[in-house]
Amino acid sequence: MNTRQIVLSSRPKGIPTIDNFAFENIELPEIKEGEVLLEGMYYSVDPYMRGRMNDAKSYVPSFEIGNPLEGSVVAKVIASKATGFAIDDLVTGRLPWRMQSIASVKGLQKIDVDIAPPSYYLSILGMTGLTAYFGLLDICKPKAGETVVVSGAAGAVGMVVGQIAKIKGCRVIGIAGSDEKLKLLKDEFGFDEAINYKTMPDIKKAIADYCPNGVDIYFDNVGGPISDAVISNINFHARIALCGQISLYNGTEIPMGPRLQPMLLTRSVLMQGFIIGNYQSRFPEGMHQLAQWLQQGKLKFTETIIHGFDQLPAALLGLFNGENTGKMVVKI
Ligand code: NAP
């Protein structure tokens, strides 16, 4: 079978461009015992993929030049030589950016579309939902009445963090990059306040104004000056979850910020980085709770769906311009 794939053609310096990707047609071999032939339906694009475009050691291997990129995909089984996997079953797994691909079923999970639409298994019932769940509950341990600030608040992780914090009885302030996003956070997702970091001249003062009792929890999705502004309002015994640093992913130099350690020390603040893979053994617990909240209407979600396989690179780059609200997904 002939299929189309997207490979990394060159490594970006700074902000990636479409020229860092190339499209190819390839011939797939026959499937073997224990394998399935899959047709991609929904492809996830995620900020961490930017790091994989660099030639640098990290918690996931770099993409190789000339090889297809890969990520989480929801796919339909179109041929099977594996017990328990039938034609038309829907699965999710880490797959190459190919329209059709062959996979061992060992790395695939079947999905239940009675619980949620298929694409939600790339987000709220997948990696980004679990990241919000464990990062907030396990690291930040929110208590009713506490003040929680979330950056990247209108994105896939951030909007779930804010809603879980509300379920736990906290006051929630979101930071995002447009007035439309702010309105959505307050009107649809129950955030108490929201700050547009692109138009607010003094974010440090805005946080102080919106958090008169200080910040008890900061869920950091973006890093950089936004995080410096939040942390300068941090409370005694506050907790900071370092989830993402998207504002720095396209940087070419090591950034210099304020030295925060004395403040963290004297205020007895916990700041902890995490990778969602650390929680793999507890994914069923997180999935169960997120699905339950979704079905009870306590959690809401939204996606930005881009249409067409060839749009995958543009969708990935769009994350760095704030083109998504909720999860950025490409539908075939
Ligand atoms: P996302 O928030 O859905 O998409 C990225 C958003 O980041 C954009 O929509 C944009 O929104 C914002 N952004 C882009 N450039 C920015 C900048 N320079 N300054 C401030 N905001 C910027 O992505 P996500 O999947 O939910 O991921 C959010 C963060 O969590 C990322 O940093 C990601 O790497 C991290 N993450 C970590 C883990 C983990 O295991 N630790 C797992 C998943 C995700 P605006 O319009 O608001 O600018």
Image: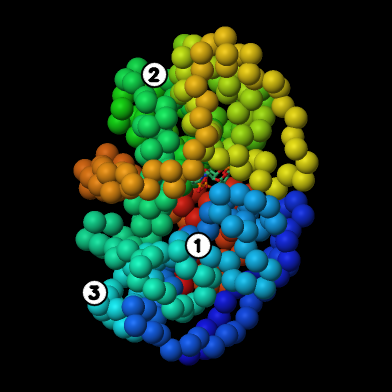
> Decide: marks 1, 3 in contact (CB < 8 A)?
no
First in sequence: mark 3 or mark 2?
Answer: 3
- Which amino acid, by three-letter code, is at mark 1? Gly
| Neighbourhood count class around disc 3 (C-alpha, 10 Å): few under 14, some 14–19, many 20 upward | few
Question: How far separated are the C-alphas under marks 1 and 3?
Answer: 24 Å
In this picture, is 286 found above or below 38? above
Q: Which mark is residue 146?
A: 2
- Front: mark 1 or 2: 1
- Label 3 sits on a secondary structure element that is loop
Question: On the image, numbered disc 1 is attached to which residue?
Answer: 71
- Label 1 sits on a secondary structure element that is strand
- Front: mark 3 or 2: 3
Identify the residue at horizontal 39%, vertical 18% (top origin).
146
Question: On the image, numbered disc 3 is attached to which residue?
Answer: 84
Residue 107 appears anywhere in the view: yes
- Label 2 sits on a secondary structure element that is loop
| Neighbourhood count class around disc 1 (C-alpha, 10 Å): few under 14, some 14–19, many 20 upward | some
Identify the residue at horizontal 56%, vertical 54% (top origin).
60
Question: How far separated are the C-alphas under marks 1 and 2?
Answer: 36 Å
- Which amino acid, by three-letter code, is at mark 2? Glu
Which quadrant does ligand 1 occupy? top right
Residue 23, x across and y down, in percent: 64, 77
Q: Quadrant of residue 131?
A: top left
Mark 1 C-beta closer than 8 Å to ligand 1: no
First in sequence: mark 1 or mark 2?
Answer: 1
- Which amino acid, by three-letter code, is at mark 3? Gly
| Neighbourhood count class around disc 2 (C-alpha, 10 Å): few under 14, some 14–19, many 20 upward | some
Question: How far separated are the C-alphas under marks 3 and 2?
Answer: 47 Å
Residue 123, x across and y down, in percent: 41, 52
In this picture, is 91 found above or below 221? below
